[in-house]
Amino acid sequence: MFDYTVKTDQTVEAVVEKLKTTLKEEEFGVLWDFNLSETLEEKGQAIDGDYRILEVCNPKEAKKVITAHREGGSFLPCKLAVFTKDGATHVGMPKPTKLIELIEDESLQTVARDVETRLTRAIDQAV
């Protein structure tokens, strides 16, 4: 699987607020909280349910990636999606370990594993 996604009975808003706290505990900041469903509705393309995308970053880890491979910045910042599907709230992210494989630089796998572990823990603690 390219992603890590879990389901919860909490609302999208409640999960987003909890994520902001658990991400901070893992040394990630929320750079952007994008309400995709609201934006699509404004553009006449409404979707069913809520859909939020959080762009998050740990500056120390981001520096490691772009120092080793400038092109790695294409994967930054990390994205977390919080959305409703089939009557439940889901929280997920593309796995950093899967994305970094595209660069084909084994030295970055350690960074990606650490980031993935910390983001997974933040998601699990929020749900």
Image (cartoon, rainbow, N blue to C red):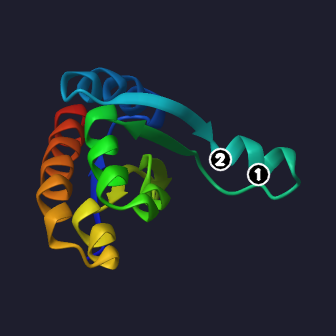
**Closer to the camera, 44 or 104?**
104
Residue designated by label 2: 36
Label 1 packing within 10 angstroms: few (<14), some (14-19), many (20+): few
The spot of residue 1 in percent (x, y) is 25, 77
Contact? badges 1 and 2 (CB < 8 Å) = yes
**Looking at the rendering, which quadrant does residue 11 occupy?**
top left
Q: Give the alpha-carbon distance from disc 1 to disc 2, as whole Å.
A: 6 Å
Residue designated by label 1: 40
Instruction: Name the side, left or right, on which 96 lies relative to 53.
Output: left
Tell me: residue 23, above or below residue 68: above
Going by the numbered disc 1, the residue's amino acid type is Leu
The spot of residue 113 in percent (x, y) is 13, 57
The spot of residue 124 in percent (x, y) is 18, 41
Q: At x 22% / y 66%, what residue is drawn?
A: 97
Which image quadrant: the C terminus?
A: top left
**Closer to the camera, 13 or 120?**
120
Label 2 packing within 10 angstroms: few (<14), some (14-19), many (20+): some
- Residue 3 appearing in the image: yes
**Closer to the camera, 25 or 57?**
57
Q: Say which element carries label 2.
A: helix
- Residue 80 appearing in the image: no
Going by the numbered disc 2, the residue's amino acid type is Leu
Tell me: residue 111, above or below residue 24: below
Tell me: residue 90, above or below residue 54: below
